[in-house]
């Protein structure tokens, strides 16, 4: 298994212009392409735990290859 950086942009349901980028470590079975498919149930669980937000977009990257917010 590979650790992948799941980069998710979530937006508030009450204020759709208020969005933020989250970096979540995710275990993938293979490539970044397979991560895109494998991440969907994980994102559904995450959204169930954060009901005031919606996922605007997401992507996968190898850890430490993307600039993370400070």
Image (tube, rainbow, N blue to C red):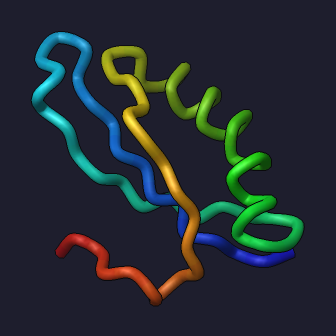
Describe residue 64's horizontal placement relative to residue 28 as left or right: left
State the image quarter where residue 7 is shown.
bottom left
Rendered position, 68 above or below 55: below
Q: Position of residue 39 (x, y in %)?
A: 69, 47
**Residue found at the very far front of the displayed protein:** 33
Give the residue displayed 55% in from the left and 33% down from the top: 46
Give the residue displayed 62% in from the left and 27% down from the top: 44
Give the residue displayed 34% in from the left and 23% down from the top: 53
Describe residue 38's horizontal placement relative to residue 52 as left or right: right
Q: Position of residue 60 (x, y in %)?
A: 57, 64
Describe residue 15's horizontal placement relative to residue 66 as left or right: left
Q: Position of residue 27 (x, y in %)?
A: 75, 64
**Residue found at the very far bottom of the displayed protein:** 64
State the image quarter where residue 45 is shown.
top right
Rendered position, 40 above or below 59: above
Of the 4 image quadrants, the one containing the C terminus is bottom left
State the image quarter where residue 1 is shown.
bottom right
Rendered position, 58 above or below 29: above
Q: How many marks?
A: 0
Judging depth in this view, the residue of 12 and 34 nearest the camera is 34
Judging depth in this view, the residue of 7 and 51 nearest the camera is 7
Q: Position of residue 5 (x, y in %)?
A: 54, 69
Describe residue 12's horizontal placement relative to residue 50 as left or right: left
**Residue found at the very far top of the displayed protein:** 14
Give the residue displayed 33% in from the left and 37% down from the top: 10
């Amino acid at each position: 298994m590979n650790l992948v950086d799941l980069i998710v942009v979530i937006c508030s349901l009450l204020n759709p212009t208020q969005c933020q980028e989250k970096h979540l470590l995710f275990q993938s079975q293979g490539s970044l392409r397979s991560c895109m498919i494998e991440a969907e149930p994980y994102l559904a669980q995450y959204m169930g735990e954060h009901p005031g937000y919606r996922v605007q977009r997401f992507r996968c990257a190898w850890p430490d290859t993307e600039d993370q917010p400070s």
